[in-house]
Image: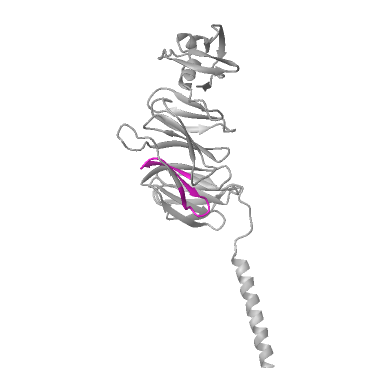
Amino acid sequence: MAGSLVKRGRYALSLLVLLLAGCASPALRGTGDLGVVIERASGSVQVVDNSHRHMLARVEGLGDLSHASVVFSRDARYAYVFGRDGAISKVDLLTFRLVKRIEQASNSIGGAISSDGRIVAAQNYEPGGVKLFDADTLTLLSEVKTTAGADGKPSRVVGLADLPGNRFVFSLFDSGEIWIVDASNPRSPSVKTSPHVGKSPYDGLASSDGRYYLAGLYGEDGLALLDTGTRNRACGAFWMAMAAARRPCRYTKCRICVVGPWRGITLFCLLSAVMRCWWLITVAGKNMPACRYWASRCL
């Protein structure tokens, strides 16, 4: 009799513990309306409910967030916060906790996540280059070292963006280049370089389909445009910008370009600024006008 009462008591106690645990658990919810707010002064982030516009929790201990940026996992459960101190912090938006934080560089200004959500990439000022990490564990997979700038140090990287097919594209601020990294094999990524894109390419972005990459030129008045879908080099899109603004072109350089089925030499001159188009001198010697938007595939 006594043994039976003890067993019943244990069963009732176990049931009570389970009920209390269930009451303490957060309500089930999706992540589609969740977001984060960077609190740069305190090195923390708020997890916010965008539907009801209120804060759900605060996650602290993320370091220097004076130039922070954020990307999200494919299921939108995790936020990857890139700090200016070179750290990457993985935040769980459902449990409101800091899952992991690593210090991968001494100075960094952002990152990106691959199209399949498996790879997190960080762009670095110091020591330069790009590092690839496993999105689940933040384990370092590989490092892409960049060309040295005038000071002999690896170029600072800015404008990092993700492209379809687990690729990344970014600008080399100090060496005036744009690189595309194919991270299909993240432990041994391949690199395609596009040199001489302009002076000090800086902030950049990719088109919605990933076909084009546009970088602002910090060192001169213009832009650089890269067709990521071909092996062609970066175009002098800053000529296009000046032509669209009806500004005189400062350059008289010629470039071999592809416009539809035509190959030829594009002459950049004052006519561009007035007519808003370029004249193409084909190999056969024929002349034809070419809309500035077509001339985005340069060899």
Q: Nearer the viewer, residue 152 or 23?
A: 152
**Quadrant of the image containing the N terminus:** bottom right
Residue 45, compared with residue 292, is above or below; it is below
Identify the image's colour scheme: rainbow, by chain, secondary structure or one colour.
one colour
Image quadrant in which you'd find residue 222: top left
Residue at point 41% right, 25% down? Answer: 196
Predominant SS of the magenta segment: strand
In the image, taking residue 3 as reference, residue 182 lies left or right, namely left
User: Can you say whether 287 is above or below 64 in the image?
Assistant: above
* Count of marks placed on residues: 0
Residue 220 lies, in percent from the top left, at 39, 23
132 drawn magenta: yes
**Foreground residue, 71 or 193?**
193
User: For the point 49% across and 13% down, which residue is it?
Assistant: 266
Question: Magenta segment range?
Answer: 121-141
Quick check: 192 above or below 24?
above
Residue at position x 68%, y 84% from top? Answer: 8
